[in-house]
Structures are given as C-alpha cells and as structure tokens.
Image (cartoon, rainbow, N blue to C red):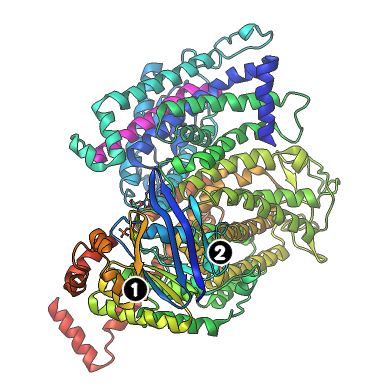
Amino acid sequence: MLRDKFVILVICITYRGDMELIFGLFAGLASGSVFALLGAGLVIAYRGSGVINFAHGSVAAYAAFTWDELRDMPGETGIGNEGGSIYLPWFDPIPEWGFLKALHINNLPVEIHIMTDPPAWLAMIITLAMSAFIGLLMHFLVFRPLRNSPMLAKVVGSVGIMLYLQAVALLNFGGSNRADDGFWVFNSTSEPIENFLGMDDKNLPRSTPYLALAAILIGALAWALYRYTRFGLATRAADENEKGATLLGYSPQFLAGLNWVISSVLAGLAGVIFLHKTMPNQLNLYVVSALAAALVGGLTSIPGAIVGGLGLGAFASMGVSATSYSWWPEWLPVDGVRAFAPVLVVILVLYFRGHKLPIRGTVGLGRQPRAPATKHPMIGVGVGVFIALLMSNIFISKWESTLTMTLVAILAMLSLVVLLGFLGQISLVQWTLAGVSSFVLIRLASDGLKVRPMDFFVVWGPGLPDPLAALGGVVAAVILGLLIGIPALRIRGVQLAVVTLAAIVAIEDLVMRNRPLMGTAAHTMNPTPKPEWFGQYVGALDEQSNQTDYWKYTVFSIIVVALAGIFVVNLRRGVIGRRFLAIRSNERAAAAAGVNVARTKMLGFGVSSFLAGLAGMLIAYKMPMVTSEFFSPFVGLAMIAFVYLGGITTVWGAVLGGMLVGGGLFSEFGGLHFEGITQAYINAVGGIGLIANAILTSGEGISLTLTNQAKALIATMRGTTPKTDEQEELVVAEEANV
Amino acid sequence: MSKLLETNGLTVTFGGLNANDNVDIGIEKGSFVGLIGPNGAGKTTFIDAITGFVPTSAGSVVFDGHDLSDLKPHQRAQLGLVRTFQSLELFEDLSVKDNLLVAAHQTTWYTLALDVFRIQQKSEEIEERIDWALEVAGLKGLEEELPTDLPHGQRKLVGVARALAAQPNLVLLDEPAAGLDTAESNALGGHLRGLLDHDVTVFLIDHDMGLVLSVCDFIYVMDFGKIIASGTPEEIRSNSEVIAAYLGEEAGEVQARSAEELRGMSDTAGE
Ligand SMILES: Nc1ncnc2c1ncn2[C@@H]1O[C@H](COP(=O)(O)OP(=O)(O)OP(=O)(O)O)[C@@H](O)[C@H]1O
Ligand SMILES: [Mg+2]
C-alpha cells in the first residue's frame, strides 16, 4: 500500500518535475547526512568487533549534550551550572542518602569545570574526546568481556548501554536543555538559502548542503582509512580471521578498541553538527535510521552506509512533502511517514538481502540461559496474591499505586518471558504493543461524551461496553504482534532486534499518535472511559470521591496478573513451551523433529502480544488518561532490562523485574527513603544491571542465580550433615585430602 | 515388496558442484539399507535433500506414496520420515528426555489450551515410546542429563533416540556410531536391527564398515554425488569399483582391519 504510494512519488518526480518533492529531496539531505555518519560509525564498530551497537545514537546524544553544556552561556539556564563544564559519562551512584548527606561524601567526580565560554574549536575537541572516551569504556567494560558470549548477550549489552547513556544524560544534563548555538553554518540562526533552485518561497537552511558535504567527505576519509592504511587492512583481516590481524602485528583486541573509538568519534561529530536541528535526546532514536543506512551498506561498506543514509533522509523527507498533497490519505500522518521510512528500508534490506549479510542465524557461542519449569506455581501464586492483598488499600493505603504499577510491569514482563526467554526471539516492541492495546481500548470504549470534567478532549468512538473494548485492544495488540512476527520467520537474532526497534518508532508515530485512527486526543492526553466489567467498576480512579487507588482495581489487577502467571507457568510445563525452548535452541533440529517452526513462532508472538495487550488494558484502567509517552521506547527498554535482571526465563524473573522497575515496589521504597532515586536513576541502574547480568550470569538473571546459590548451599549443608558413619568418614577423608 | 522411499534422478547443486547427481535409490519397507562413500561424497546432502533441508534442483522423492516435493521438513517428519544429523543438532539446553518429548508429541490447534489447563496428552503411550527409544539408544538412566554433559558418542545417540521418539516409518541415521568404540558400535547395530521388528525401516550412513557390512541388507555406494554401486554386503565387498573408489584395498581386509583404525576414520568424519 505504502510502497505503491512511493512508486507514485517517484513517477511524480520523473514526469511532472514536481518541485515540492524535489525540494523535499534536498531538505532531507540534512537528516540524511546524520543517518549516513551514524550508519558509517555502525559499520566501523561492526567490522571492528562484530557488534551491532544499538547505543550508537545515544553516544551521539551524549556528545551533543556535552557540546551544548560546554557552550552554554553564563546566565543561561543550564542545570546547576553556568556552562563550560563537562560531565563524565556516569553518575554518582550513591545519592545523598540519609547520614551520608550530612557527611557530604562526594562519591564519584562527575562534573569538571573547563572554562567559561570555551571557543568552538576547543569545545569540539573536548566533545570528540568525550565520545572517544565513551567508545573506550564501551569496549573495555562491555563488549570485550562479552566477546565470546552468544549474540543475544551482545545485543542485550548494547541495549543496556543505550538505556544507561540515555538515563545518565538525563541525570547529568536534564531533559531538554539546548543552547541553540552550533558553530559556523551549523547554526539555526544562519541565513537560509532563499528561493532554492529558483523555487519561490522555498528556503533551504544554509547548513543543509554543508551537512551533506560533510557526510560525503568524512565518509570518503573513513573509507580511505580502511582501504589504504595498514590499520585498515588489519581490521579487514581481523574481520575475517583474527589470526590475520595478528600476522600484521596488531592484537585483535587493540583493533577492536580503536574501531570503537573511531566509531564513537564519528557519532559525536554527527551529534554536534546536527545539534542545531534537533534536541540532543532525540538523537537516541536516530540509531533506527542509522541502522537502516548501515544495512543498505550490508553492514560492511562505509560508502554504502553513506549513500544509504543520504538516500533514506531524502526518501523520508519526500514522503513528508507528499503528505501535503490533496490526494494523500489523511490517516497517514506526517510523523508516521517519517518514522516508517527507515522501517521500510530495514525490512526490505533484511528480507531480500538478509542471507547475504554477515550475520545470520542464532548460532552463537555459549549457552542460552536455562529455563527451568516452576514445579509448584500455586504456592508462589498464593504467597504473591497474599502479599499483594496485604499491600493493597484494604490494609495500607499509600502502597496501592506502587503495587498496581508493579503488577502492570510483571504482566508486561511475562510477555517478554514468553517471547524472549522461552522462544528466544529478541523483540524489543512488546511494550509498544501494550500501548496499542491501551489506545485501541480507549478508542473503542469512547462514545463522544466527555468522561470527566477535567478532560481537555472528547474522543469519538463506538462506545463499546468494557470487556468488549478491552478485547478489542488485546486483539489489536495480537494482530500487530503477529504482523511483526512475520519477519521473524525469515530473520532472527540481532536482525529481529533491529526490525523491532524500528517498529517501535513506526508504531508510535504511525499507529498510536495517529489522530484519524485513534481519535483526537491520541497525541496528547487520551481520556479513559470508565471501565465496568459485568456491572463492577474496575478502574483505579474512584469517580465518587475522585481519589485514585480504588480497591476493586487492585483486586482486578491481582486476579489478572495471577492468572497470567499461572498461564505462563503452565505454558512452560506443557508441550508448546517445550517446543518454544526447542526452537530457541535449534530451529533445524526442531523442524526435523516434526515441529512446525513457523506456526509455533507465530503462536509465541501471539501469546506474548496477548499478555502485552492485557498489560495495556490494566494501564488504561489505572489512569484517567493515557499518553503515548508512557509507552516510550525507553520505558520499554527498561522493562527488558529489568526482566533480564530478574531472570528472563522464569515467571519469578518477571515478578522480581516488576518490583525492580521504575515506579515498582523497590524503586518507590527507595524513593521514599532516599533522595535522588528518580526514574532516570533507576533506568541507569537498570542499564548497568542489564550489562552486568549479561557478563556475569550469562543472562540467567537474579532469580535463577539466587536459586542456584540456595540449592548449592542446601547441598553443601546436607553434604556436611553426617547421615551415616560411612558418609562422615567420606567427608573426613575428603577434608584430609584438602 | 513395496518401496517405502524412492528417489528418481535426485540432483542437488551447490554453486557449480553437483553434490548429488541423478541419484536413484529405493528403500523397501522393513529393510535395513546402508549408504557408504568417502568423505564429501554427498551422503549427508542426500539425507538433507530427502528431508527437505536443501532444495533439489531436479528429480523427485516419493515417500510412502506421497510426492514430497512441496512439503516442508516438519511435514515430512510428520509423515514418518525422520532423520538424525551428523553434526548433532540437539536441543542443548533441554534434558535428554525433553529432547525426546519435543519429537514425541503431536500438536493440534488447541494444544495450547490443553497445556494451560494441564490436561495430560496421551502420556502413557508417549512414555512407552520414549522408554523404548532410550532403550534402543542405550541411554536408560540418562533422562535428566543435559546433552552437553554427555560424551560425544552418547550425544549422537540422543539424536537417534529423538528420531525414534518421533514414531518414524523410516529413520535416516547419519553416522550414529561416530564416537563409539567397537563394542558400543556393535551393541548399537544390534539394537538398530531390532527396529525392524517395530515396523521401522532403517537407512544408515556410517564410516564404520564393520557396522555397515554386518547390519545392512542392502548397501548403496556413493562417490562424487553419484551412486557407483549397490548390492548386498557380499556384493559390495567384492565390487572392484567400490574398492577403487572407497575402500582402496581388498574389501575383505577392511573388515579384518583393526577396529582402532576404523574408529580413527569415523572420528575425522564426524568433525
Ligand atoms: N551448504 C553447502 N554449500 C556448498 N557446498 C556444500 C554444502 N553442503 C555440502 N557441500 C559440499 O557438497 C559435497 C558433499 O558434502 P556432504 O556433506 O554431503 O558429504 P558426505 O558424504 O556427507 O561427507 P562426510 O562423510 O564427510 O560426512 C562436499 O563437497 C561439500 O563440500
Ligand atoms: Mg556427511
């Protein structure tokens, strides 16, 4: 459908010489150049160490923040300082807690003041040095330790960095500060090129041609570096065979480190020269388009990535221009088109060229995390429900909201346990599906009347009674989940992670914030109609007293989550769960054993999306209104981080992860007693935890590790507890040996 | 007797190379057929082709009256055409028993519901079959082990047991004895012969000539993707073309050669 539209676009250009689109093409070269530079950096990192770095955009963002902070004029609003400072890429992990606060213990140096109002060239050097430093940290702390781990662990590691850097930037720089002074032409105040190409009233920003030129020039330089120098030759040799590099006199790990530095410096450069056109934190998700560009270059060609990036920018921008035509369908919003362009490229490249890309298949080194079946789920569920009820309004009121947030997170994480843990499909999109379910539910339940006096918007809709509306939401999530599962039939591993990351952005702009589709309020605060199940009000907002935390919602959530938990436990213990694990382990072997791999995978995507959809329903019922920010990609990535930390392969892992996540029991408890435990803090810790978990427990997570420790402990205790004389003698003999 | 599996002009091409070239093979129901040939002859490719793991460029495969050309690997397995892999391909993070259970269960559209409500699915019949498969492969008592904790030879046997658990009509074994010593190999041969009594037809690839010559009723010899000879063990032993292409010496001597040497040969093949 959309592809047809783009074919029409191309025809328009060739036959009608359409100026609007041609202008769109040129204007798109600006963002295209950033995609190109970031894409080239991804290629370099990939060739250096075989990792697809999901955090690449976040490196650019951190650099942009650094530049921005350095150039912040005295007196302007920076966070807590007057500009001219750098913030090292970490945060003080011990906030000023309790008595520590009185002691003024400064735990870790974070801020370093350089000078007030540094000149542009110095700021540039410092910023690029910061990028290089981040590159080195990534190499030594994450990817080097993970070099012999399965692909999944590397993906998880880079997602952890992405989450971490984004959160640390938030902690150190605040959310949205932006000084708006780039340098030279890369400045939003520089005069535009008027009447571009003789087009009346078309003004092209002066920076655009320079950006494109910069991308091409830097790309050419990087290409020459890898083509003609000894270092480049060694990298290419190491790419194929680590011994080759050693023969040329380089250690493969040195090469990898240097490539990380080059890749990160390119990211930093891209961030700085593009800063005048965006907010630094937006750069985080530029990684999606950069991935598309890198994929056009087959993940190995720098010129390919440059061409791909520029092309993608132009393509997306022409798509955006096309939305101004009268024939453009209203239900395809501008942002959606822009976000969908990279998805289209990613899917097309992976689908048609996936087999030619250097990475394919899931076969990696190391073993997948174990997924033991829960033997006595009823005991666990009983205890869990009991504790939940204790914490609910019925007994102590202030924990209610935290409790239900934890329950929602547990439910969302159960969906991840099924898909990532059991089936081994690295999908990053499930949380977004929860959002779709929420939005569709609201749309279906709305009847065009104002729900509450405080609402700004009125949403039109069929006004379905509630279990039906919820069903509609869940079904929408399942359908979308299955659609996303289709590529998973052909591509797997990291490539699926790439597709689903792209899908997150596309769904957010194309589906959730789509006003014709989701109603007038979709892009802001979407009011939730009052939910009633079979005559019982189950929303969290008590409409009479206008207070939140209505106990029936809590009970409702406890029931839903408990049932979902039992569902997942039984799934794992049953025939299908075993087949999921078989597919995770070896698809060829599963097919040979008579397993219909395609259908079973689809079943997994369906089940997981069903659970995510239920989580979306609980969220809609929890809030008087729902915004798409609540389903932002970073909340979703945090969910993944924490369920990995808890244990991606077990229901207990989801329970633990749900308690750890921001807004969950642990973080709220922490926030209550200590200052500085913010959402960003939690996410940063989550990012670290994700990485540490990938390195230290080979991804098994806290719950399994603890269980193992406990079992080992019990075993030793039993072993040393003499039962018979014979055993005692054995123990004594063994001790004597030691 | 009726043919259970029949290939006609089966050809598989990799690049320019014909890994299987016009292969005609027939396997009679209830027989024990062997396929031998030097390394790289195309034996594994042949199994891959009939089980749907590599595309064929020409020829047809008929199994139990079904033309297999449009069927996916799992559909062929469900028809009872089950294979093992030379390169193990086990479910490494599932226990031995779970490896077998994956193959043993049939699913329908409502299996998920049965799972969720914990409705037992034909458990007795399946337990019996798994017991039997473990028995044949000599893996009794190792049900709860992870394949990665077993020695190479036994891991191969997990593959055999898993194939048997899938209720095969014809089982295609790709070097199941690689990594076993002569005694274990002979024991396996005996167990495999026993499969014929359970209505399982066997197709065996192995480099252990002692095993192949002693258990098979009929043997095909492949070299450079072509079938160069076929016949009973006695005929193969005295076939001069086979001796030239594969055995490289008097067939009788081969059989007499020390088991150690033979094992060395199959070990390198298994890598
Ligand atoms: N996927 C493939 N792509 C290209 N060539 C292949 C592929 N698989 C096998 N070949 C080639 O086809 C030929 C036959 O290989 P095959 O594995 O079938 O031999 P084999 O008889 O099983 O050998 P062995 O006794 O060592 O197991 C070999 O030359 C091999 O290199
Ligand atoms: Mg072989």
Give me the C-alpha separation between circle 1 and circle 2.
Answer: 32 Å
Is residue A189 toward the left or the right of residue B34 in the image?
right
Looking at the rendered structure, which numbered label has been put on residue A234?
A: none
Residue A274 part of the magenta-drawn span: yes
Residue A684 part of the magenta-drawn span: no
The quadrant where residue A56 appears: top left
Pointer 2: residues within 10 angstroms few (<14), some, or many (20+)? many
Determine the chain carrying the residue at label 2: B
Q: Is residue A651 above or below residue A232?
A: below
Residue, far bottom: A725
Is residue A414 toward the left or the right of residue B227 in the image?
right
Q: Would residue B148 be seen by someone viewing this image from the given angle?
A: yes
Pointer 1: residues within 10 angstroms few (<14), some, or many (20+)? some
Helix, strand or loop under label 1? loop
**Quick one: quadrant of the N terminus of chain A?**
top right
| Foreground tag (1 vs 2) | 1
**Quick one: quadrant of the C terminus of chain A?**
bottom left
Where is ligand 1, by quadrant? bottom left
As rendered, which of A515 and A291 lies closer to the eye? Answer: A291
Question: Bounds of the magenta span?
Answer: A251-277
- Return the residue at label 1: B232
- Return the residue at label 2: B75
Q: In this view, does B59 lie above or below A628?
A: below
**Residue drawn 28% across the image and 91% down it:** A723
As rendered, which of A268 and A389 lies closer to the eye? Answer: A268
* Spot occupied by residue A220 in the image (x, y as percentages of width and height): 39, 21
Q: In this view, does A692 lie above or below B239?
A: above
**Residue drawn 20% across the image and 84% down it:** A731
